[in-house]
Image: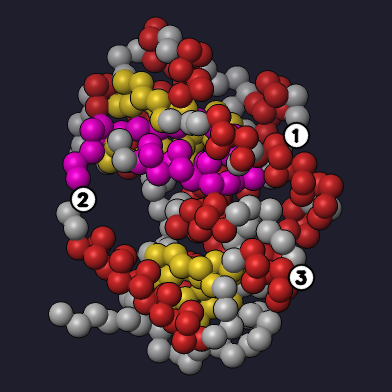
Amino acid sequence: MSKDNSSNIITGIFDFIVKDIRKAIKETRMKNDKPVGVGVYTTEYCEENFFTKPYKSLEHRKEIASGLEGVDFVFEVNSKDQEEVENIKNKALNEYLERKNKEEEPKKYKLGFIIGSFDVFHAGHNENIELSSELCDNLYVVLKTDERIEKHKHKTPMQNTTERAKVLKSLKKVQEVLYMDVDSTRTDVLEDVINKFHEQFPNETLDKKEIVAIFGEDLKEKEINREEWDEINLEFTPRPESKMKEVSSTAYQNAIKSKDGGMENIEKKEKQYLQTRLADDEPSTDDEGRG
């Protein structure tokens, strides 16, 4: 069977997910019904052509891009040779089409939720969301508000509640984003999640045994208290210490403050090197790789 290799392509650094990235993906998705692919510039390409070095590794940036709503497949860009890039893109597109044709396995739970701050979204966050989504049909994210973080962690988030929520809502695996306010209890969280489910699926029944709260394994001792979670299930995703050190929100936050002067400059850089090409358009010949 012949395969249609036409697709919509967006290329960029994808070090940090900013509003221009979300906007570009949304607008590209609306143009036609072709798959949307994201080409992520390698670290070497960024250094040689843009004179900038991403904070995150290529693999981590590809992981983040692949989790965004509207993105069907991801590939890497390490050359100005359009034919070489096109071959890499086509391979990733064909792999996506093959995956799409496979039947999705049934999930263990009907409803699941995770809780977190997600301040400066990174590959570790995305991996946890991906693993959590494999457990349930509908995954909700309960986001800790600025006020809660300031009270319990004694620090101000680099991205405010609204911006962090926008990033999470742009992820394809996230059904809805709810909030854990400064005075919210675990009972409040569970009630909010159940109410939101019934609001979105008014004709669906929901037993508490069909609900799962999902945490990283490093929180197992803290969250194992069954009384606080009533009759729902608890699951714990793997969180290796080595990866936690490698993809730390705190490390990224400190680096942004010390090297680039804040998120405003990060947003400018991401926008500067973001490029979009629709299906059947001529490949760009812009040597700088800019839109």
Give coordinates of residue 260: x percent, y percent.
81, 55
* Quadrant the C terminus occupies: bottom right
Q: Reply above or below: 109 against 93.
A: above
Q: Are marks 2 and 3 in contact (CB under 8 Å)?
A: no
Q: Reply above or below: 268 against 286.
A: above
Residue at point 82%, 52% (across, down): 259
Helix, strand, or loop for circle 2?
Answer: loop
Task: Please state which of residues 249 and 239 is positioned toward the viewer in this rendering.
Answer: 239
Q: Is residue 263 visible?
A: yes
- Magenta stretch? 105-133
* Residue 156: image tag: 1
Helix, strand, or loop for circle 3?
Answer: loop
Look at label 1 and name its amino acid: Thr
Q: Reply above or below: 61 against 161.
A: below
* Residue 104: image tag: 2
Give coordinates of residue 137: x percent, y percent.
28, 41
Task: Please state which of residues 3 and 154 is positioned toward the viewer in this rendering.
Answer: 3
Residue at point 35%, 82% (across, down): 6
Residue at point 63%, 24% (across, down): 182
- N-terminal-most mark, 2 or 1: 2
Look at label 3 and name its amino acid: Phe
Task: Please state which of residues 76 and 28 is positioned toward the viewer in this rendering.
Answer: 76
- N-terminal-most mark, 3 or 1: 3
Q: Is residue 19 visible?
A: no
Count of number-bearing discs: 3
- N-terminal-most mark, 2 or 3: 3
* Residue 51: image tag: 3
Residue at point 84%, 47% (across, down): 258
Q: Which circle, 2 or 3, is nearer the viewer?
A: 3
Q: CA distance from mark 2 to mark 3?
A: 42 Å
